[in-house]
Amino acid sequence: MIRLGPSSTLRLRSEVRLRVVDGEAVVLVQDRAVIVGLDSVGTRVIGLLANDSSPQEIAAGIRRQLEAGAADVEGDVLRFLTELVSLGVVELVDAPVQEGAG
Amino acid sequence: MTFAEHYLVDPAQFPGALGERHWGAESLTLGLAGRAFRVEGLGENQQEQLRSRFRGYCLDAEPSEPVVLRVLRGDATCFLPQPSGVWVYSLDLDHRDESVAWAGVREAGVLELVPAFSASMWTVEGAGNIFARAVENVLRLIVAYALLEAGGALFHGACVVDDGKAVLFPGVSGSGKSTSSRIAAHEGRTVLSDDIVGVVASATGYEAVALPFGSEFRFPGPWDARFPVRAMCRLVKGETILVNDLSRAEALGLALACTPYVNHDPARTERLFGNLLHLIRSVRLRTLCFPKDGPIWAALPPGAL
């Protein structure tokens, strides 16, 4: 599995199409025949991903939007983005952090 | 993966290498989802077989601009043999801006979408259930594109008519479409289909259209029957009857997952999203939990679906 770092650069894959309905995104990954539903927080993450951005930046954006404490937001965002990478929703622009590194 | 690599000997030569030989000079015109479809190039036995399969949907009068489906002989040497062992069968699709090509076991074809719909299919088997099934599969594909163009969609789903209104149950295999359809029929409801449902936009909302596609239940016709859609419903198998609201996002995801042929066509995603969003804003959205032995309809509170 690809391991993301806090400063990895990510973007939506070009094969992804999505619609936001009542604050929740429905994501279609065209080339993988995958459909993903996101809750309101997941939809915010996708919204913050509109430009090339890092998990660190997205976590900061989530903290601002939700007025959440710093504690676990970055870890949660990293795990969520890792899942989106495995589903083909998001791709890594730079090289992944190697397993076992650091 | 290359288009048709599991089905054609030389996909790069498709469709040219398959030739232009018809099975015969007969044709049959069908009324499907508000449009006329003329199936051409049939032998007499094939025509009769399709007439029997699609009884209730055959048109006597020749419409002015039918969608033409040419049925051609497939050269067996151009096709790979059927895979052995356990395998999952699905048509291989190649979506292009102006057409869609498909290939399956000893059959293949192309649907041209512009300037007008027209299709050619090649099949090695010219008789029996395999032939009729191949033609039906292609008609399903063409109808999916025709409905999309008309502002609607073809759903993998069941549809039940209750009090003159249609309730749509989109669902993939195993979701409970067949079981709920059997219960509905047992309770005296009309089952439009337990497998494939067509929905079109109308002046007042959406209508479920008669189609001759289904597994155990397929609507016998007439071909122009339509029923206003009252609700779209996610099926959940459970112990007791329970009805809950379904969010519009969940409904969109469900609908998107259940629109075969077109939901992975990159050239038509925007149109599909648009049609489905309009539909889910026009009908009631529900989740129905139901016991496998029923009842459903007799146990529902008034106005629940």
Image: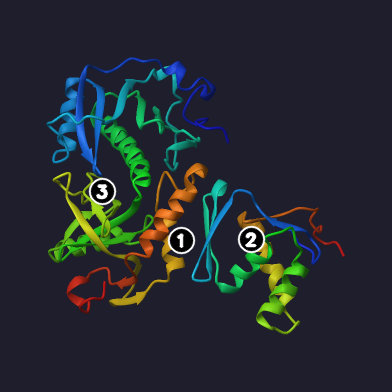
Labelled pair 2, 3 in contact (Cβ < 8 Å): no
What colouring does the structure picture have? rainbow
* Residue B299 drawn above or below residue B217: below
Same-chain status of marks 2 and 1: no
Q: x and y percent of residue B28 in the render?
A: 19, 28
Near mark 3 (Cα within 10 A), the count class, few <14, some 14-19 or many ≥20, is few
Q: Position of residue B183 (x, y in %)?
A: 20, 64
> Residue under circle 2?
A84
Residues at marks 2 and 3, CA–CA distance in whole angstroms: 36 Å
Q: Residue at x 36, y 60 (%)?
A: B279
At x 40%, y 15%, the residue is B19
Check disc 1 and report the residue beneath it.
Answer: B253
Disc on the earlier residue, 3 or 1: 3
Classify residue B144 by image quadrant. top left
Is there one chain holding both mark 2 and mark 3?
no
SS for dot 1: helix
* Disc 2 crowd, CA 10 A, few/some/many (<14, 14-19, 20+): some
The three-letter code of the residue at mark 1 reads: Gly
Q: Amino acid at mark 3?
A: Ser
Which residue ends up furthest to the front in the rendered image? B203
User: At 42% from the left edge and 43% from the top edge, which residue is drawn?
Assistant: B261
Residue B100 image label = none
> Residue B305 sits in which quadrant?
bottom left
For marks 2 and 3, give the one nearer the viewer: 2
Provide residue A20's location: percent of width, then percent of height: 52, 64
Left or right of residue B11, residue B207 in this image = left
Kindly identify which numbered label has been placed on residue B215.
3
Instruction: Give the number of callouts.
Output: 3
Three-letter code, disc 2: Leu
Q: Tell me which chain the residue with mark 3 is part of.
A: B
